[in-house]
Each structure stands twice: as structure tokens, then as C-alpha cells.
């Protein structure tokens, strides 16, 4: 077995600091299998290490929300004992590398997430973003992604009923592929992935394991770069017809009340599914890797654990239900294997060729995964004026300070169009058509937008050749009340305003032209 080092850990997508943390959590240096498992679980795709802090700030609870984030899919009550079960997932990087299969396997994954919770999937939707229509790769990517999403769903009998598609040059090298599936189930028949019951059998069902998409989750967490296309072998190839068989077999078994917990083998394959089930139940899990159904010879523990072969499930059964469950899956022509059991060790323990090849504390892979609060820039918006009476009370020096701070923070980010838009807010006729879609961080439903519009309409008004009184007061302050400087600045400001108006008129015409082009296309 290859010797593990810091350099090897870095090649697995871990940082030197993360490698040191692994050693500290385990009390020793990991072997190759253990390193691979940590790399799979500690990437962005599985641990959300850069986004979890922010995701946890979002509202996720409501009297209608039965299951929020943390399960295979979300569950919302819509009355009469029925629930809608849904999953939304991005498959950006795989779809960029191999558009058809990348998008198709993304759909396959969310379908499994939905029916593992006891729902029959009924509809797919999507939200996809591509680069400029004139970009050399846009047509290729668009055709592949749309075909992949629709094709996989059609084969399994779940149509794509809606979605949205947009084009912008900012997506030329970084497309966004978001797929969604919706299923329906009875409120009292929802299944979860929380494992329970020490000694309960752990069962592998579905397709055999191959050398598919190894480190696929790590790849999906990486940056888009010039080497992205060389990573095509890490993109899995799915089989929707096998998925259909798996769906029907799982739903049939669910009617038998034999399942304790069930988890899709998606990102990170057997690694993620086994760890998530055990950790949620605060238990351990022991697996004999020699019992895993493999379609390729001489697969190593590393390959078995990290394979992302599609159309597979991990199930914890009630004791005594093994024979009944096996009969169902074999009837549907699917593999069925009892591969291990739940333990009270709170460890992931793997056996291969009668040797212990892995022993990792379960919670070190999930709860103790790194969390990062990445650097970001915030805007310091000018003070809000709500009423005419407040205008008289405005501290002009304070306003100018806040305004300049805001402006420079925008410039620092390189968003020059935002700076220009700030200075042209007074053009009411352009606001609905142009400013709302162009300004980041502000939308039409945000009350701050209306306040900001009011702010600039009242304070940077231009009526013919006359500036508004507040504009003149600001100008005087900035020019230290020097008449010559005020006069000179006023002329420059007038020219600048006319230039900005001309600029935005041109942009408005360009937007209208593109809109007409897209509508005709």
C-alpha cells in the first residue's frame, strides 16, 4: 500500500492544515484507504466546508416543513395527509466536462434522493445558465446538458415539465446546471437515512460497483481550469433503465415495513452513504468489502469505497427481513448483498481479505469536517432617507463620507457598472428595464432598492442646466467652498452626466437588441 504523506494528501485535494487535523483526530497517520475517505468527505461537494456557515443562516423551518436540510431530500406538507418531497442539486463541473453524462447523472442522483424517502418521482425541472450564444462551446454544452436532463428523466418515466435558461458571457467558462425533482408520498410513510439498532444488517442493492468516477466528488469541488476536460474519466455514466428497476424495487420493499434506514450512494459512493447513515444515528458501521458486488476484477478497498458507480443504494434492514428483501431485488434483476452490520463503536470499520483496512471515528468525517468563513467584501451603503423631513436633518459631511466609502468598495471589486448605475439612478425611465437586472445584491423585491431610488432621485437631481440644491451643497463641501473649483467641477459633472446618459442609452438599446434576437431565435 502506498505510503501516505502531506504531499499525497495535497494531491487528494486536502490542505496541509487539513492533513494535520486528520492526524490529530485519528491519533496517527492515516493509511491510503483512510486518506481517500477523508478526501472524499472533506471536499466542498460532501462537507460544504466553505458554504455551510452561510447555508445555516437561511430560514429552513416552518409549520409546513417536515424535513429541512440534512436528509436525502426536503419534505413539505401540502395537506390531506400528503407531502411533496423534492431535491435540487447542481452538477456544474461534470456537465462542463461531459455535458450529456454530467447532467444525466445529476438527474439520476436527485431521483434516487427522492424515492429513497418513499416518494414516487413525478416531475423534473431545471435552472441552467450558459455563456454567450456566440461562444464556441455554448451550442455543444447546451445540446448535451438539455439532452442529458431530458433523456434520463424520459427513460425512467419522469418528464421535465419546466425550467429556465439564460445566456451571458460570464458563464463562458463556468456553466451552471441545476436540476430539481419532485415526488409525492403519504405523510406517515416517509423514510429517513438515520440508522438505528446495533446488529441490524447493512445491505447493498442495485448495480455492481466498478471503477467509475473515483474522486468524482473531489473533482466536482475543484475550480474550472484548462485541465478540466482531461478529467472526463471522473464523470460517471448512468443507466436510467436500471434506475427504474431500482425505484420500483425500493418502493415495493418500503411497503413491507422492513427498512430501518436507506441512503443513496451518490457523491463519494459507499463512503458517504455508510458514514452519513451511521453518524446520524450516533452509531458505528462495519463492512466486509469482499462482499461488495463488483463488476471488475481485483478492485482494491480504495477503489471500492470511492467508486461513484450509479444506481446503487445502502439499506439498513430490520433483523429477520433479509430473505424477504432479497427476493424483491432479485425479482427486479438487481444485486442484493448483506455486507455488514451496525455497531456501537462509532467508527467506520472496513475489512478486506480478513484484514482491517480502515478504522475512522465516524464523527471526524462529518461533524468535525472543516468549516471555513472565506474572505468577502461587504458594501457600506449610504444612509437611507425615508421622508422629506429627513432631508433637512441630513449631515452632508457624513453623507459624502458614506457615499465615497460605498463607491470605492464597489470599484475595489471591479464592478464599474455598479458605480455608473449609482450615479444615474435619477433616470427613472431606465430603472425597471436596466438597473434591476444589472445591479448585484439588490433586487426588485428588496425594499432597499426603493429606498435607494428615492435617495438618489432626491439628492442628485438635474433639471436642465440646474443642479438640485443638495447636489450643490455636496459640491461646495467637496470643493472647500472655492467658487472657481465649484464652477469647474459643475461643468465636469454635467459632462460626466451626459456621458453616462449616453452610455446607458447605448446599453439599453443593446439589451433590447439582444432580447429581440433571443425571442426570434
Image: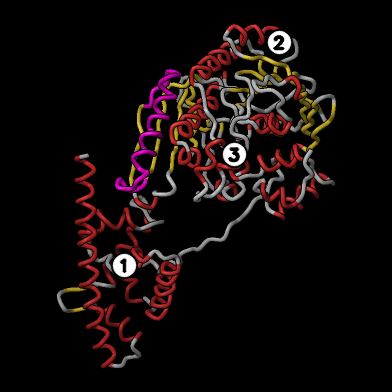
Neighbor class of circle 3 (other Cα within 10 Å; few <14, some 14-19, many 20+) is: many
- Prevailing secondary structure of the magenta residues: helix
Label 1, label 3: how far apart the Cα atoms are: 41 Å
Q: Is residue 351 left or right of residue 104?
A: right
Q: Is residue 121 left or right of residue 117?
A: left
User: Dividing the image into 4 quarters, which one contains the C terminus?
Assistant: top left
Local secondary structure at mark 1: helix
Label 2, label 1: how far apart the Cα atoms are: 68 Å
Examine the image and state in which quarter residue 203 appears: top right
- Disc 3 designates what residue? 217
Depth check, mark 1 against mark 3: the one in front is 3
| Range shown magenta | 131-160
Q: Which label's residue is closer to the chain start, 2 or 3?
A: 3
Residue 510 magenta-highlighted: no
Task: Give the label on residue 321, or none.
Answer: 2
Task: Give the label on residue 420, or none.
Answer: 1
Which residue is outermost to the left? 464
Residue at x 69%, y 23% (from the top left corner): 297
Q: Which label's residue is closer to the chain start, 2 or 1?
A: 2
Is 320 placed above or below 195 here? above
Cβ atoms under marks 1 and 3 closer than 8 Å: no
Is 44 placed above or below 89 here? below
Amino acid at each position: 500500500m502506498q505510503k501516505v504523506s502531506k504531499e499525497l494528501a495535497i494531491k487528494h485535494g486536502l490542505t496541509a492544515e487539513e492533513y494535520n487535523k486528520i492526524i490529530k483526530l485519528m491519533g496517527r497517520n492515516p493509511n491510503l484507504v483512510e486518506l481517500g475517505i477523508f478526501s472524499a468527505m472533506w471536499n466542498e461537494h460532501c462537507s460544504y466546508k466553505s458554504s455551510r456557515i452561510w447555508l445555516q443562516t437561511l430560514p429552513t423551518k416552518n409549520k409546513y416543513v417536515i424535513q429541512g436540510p440534512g436528509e436525502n431530500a426536503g419534505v413539505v406538507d401540502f395537506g390531506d395527509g400528503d407531502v411533496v418531497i423534492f431535491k435540487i442539486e447542481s452538477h456544474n463541473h461534470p456537465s462542463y466536462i461531459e455535458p450529456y453524462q454530467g447532467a444525466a447523472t445529476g438527474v439520476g442522483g436527485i431521483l434516487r434522493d427522492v424515492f429513497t424517502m418513499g416518494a414516487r418521482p413525478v416531475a423534473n425541472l431545471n435552472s441552467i445558465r450558459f455563456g454567450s450564444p456566440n461562444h464556441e462551446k455554448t451550442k455543444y454544452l447546451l445540446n448535451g446538458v438539455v439532452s442529458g436532463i431530458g433523456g434520463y428523466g424520459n427513460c425512467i418515466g419522469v418528464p421535465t415539465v419546466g425550467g429556465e435558461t439564460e445566456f451571458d458571457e460570464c458563464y463562458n467558462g463556468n456553466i451552471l446546471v441545476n436540476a430539481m425533482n419532485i415526488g409525492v408520498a403519504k405523510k406517515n410513510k416517509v423514510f429517513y437515512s438515520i440508522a438505528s439498532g446495533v446488529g441490524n444488517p447493512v445491505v447493498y442493492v442495485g448495480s455492481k460497483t466498478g471503477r467509475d468516477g473515483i474522486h468524482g466528488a473531489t473533482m466536482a469541488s475543484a475550480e474550472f481550469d484548462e485541465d478540466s476536460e482531461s478529467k472526463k474519466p471522473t464523470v460517471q455514466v448512468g443507466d436510467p433503465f436500471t434506475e427504474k428497476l431500482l425505484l420500483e424495487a425500493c418502493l415495493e420493499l418500503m411497503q413491507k415495513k422492513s427498512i430501518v434506514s436507506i441512503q443513496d450512494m451518490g457523491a463519494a459512493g459507499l463512503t458517504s452513504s455508510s458514514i452519513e447513515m451511521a453518524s446520524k444515528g450516533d452509531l458505528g458501521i462495519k463492512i466486509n468489502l469482499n462482499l461488495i458486488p463488483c463488476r471488475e476484477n481485483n478492485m482494491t478497498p480504495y477503489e471500492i469505497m470511492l467508486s461513484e458507480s450509479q444506481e446503487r443504494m445502502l439499506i439498513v434492514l430490520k433483523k429477520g427481513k433479509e430473505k424477504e428483501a432479497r427476493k424483491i431485488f432479485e425479482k427486479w434483476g438487481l444485486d442484493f448483498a448483506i455486507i455488514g452490520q451496525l455497531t456501537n463503536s462509532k467508527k467506520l470499520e472496513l475489512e478486506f481479505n480478513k484484514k482491517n483496512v480502515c478504522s475512522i471515528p465516524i464523527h471526524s468525517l462529518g461533524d468535525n469536517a472543516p468549516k471555513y468563513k472565506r474572505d468577502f467584501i461587504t458594501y457600506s451603503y449610504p444612509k437611507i432617507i425615508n421622508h422629506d423631513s429627513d432631508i433637512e436633518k441630513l449631515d452632508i459631511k457624513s453623507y459624502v463620507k458614506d457615499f465615497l466609502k460605498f463607491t470605492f468598495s464597489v470599484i475595489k471589486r471591479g464592478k464599474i457598472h455598479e458605480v455608473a448605475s449609482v450615479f444615474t439612478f435619477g433616470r427613472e425611465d431606465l430603472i425597471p428595464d436596466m438597473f434591476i437586472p444589472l445591479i448585484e445584491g439588490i433586487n426588485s423585491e428588496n425594499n432597499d432598492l426603493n429606498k435607494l431610488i428615492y435617495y438618489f432621485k432626491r439628492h442628485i437631481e438635474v433639471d436642465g442646466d440646474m443642479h438640485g440644491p443638495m447636489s450643490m451643497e455636496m459640491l461646495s463641501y467637496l470643493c472647500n467652498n472655492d467658487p472657481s473649483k465649484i464652477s469647474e467641477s459643475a461643468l465636469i459633472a454635467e459632462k460626466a452626466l451626459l456621458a453616462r446618459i449616453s452610455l446607458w442609452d447605448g446599453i439599453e438599446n443593446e439589451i433590447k437588441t439582444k432580447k429581440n434576437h433571443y425571442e426570434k431565435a
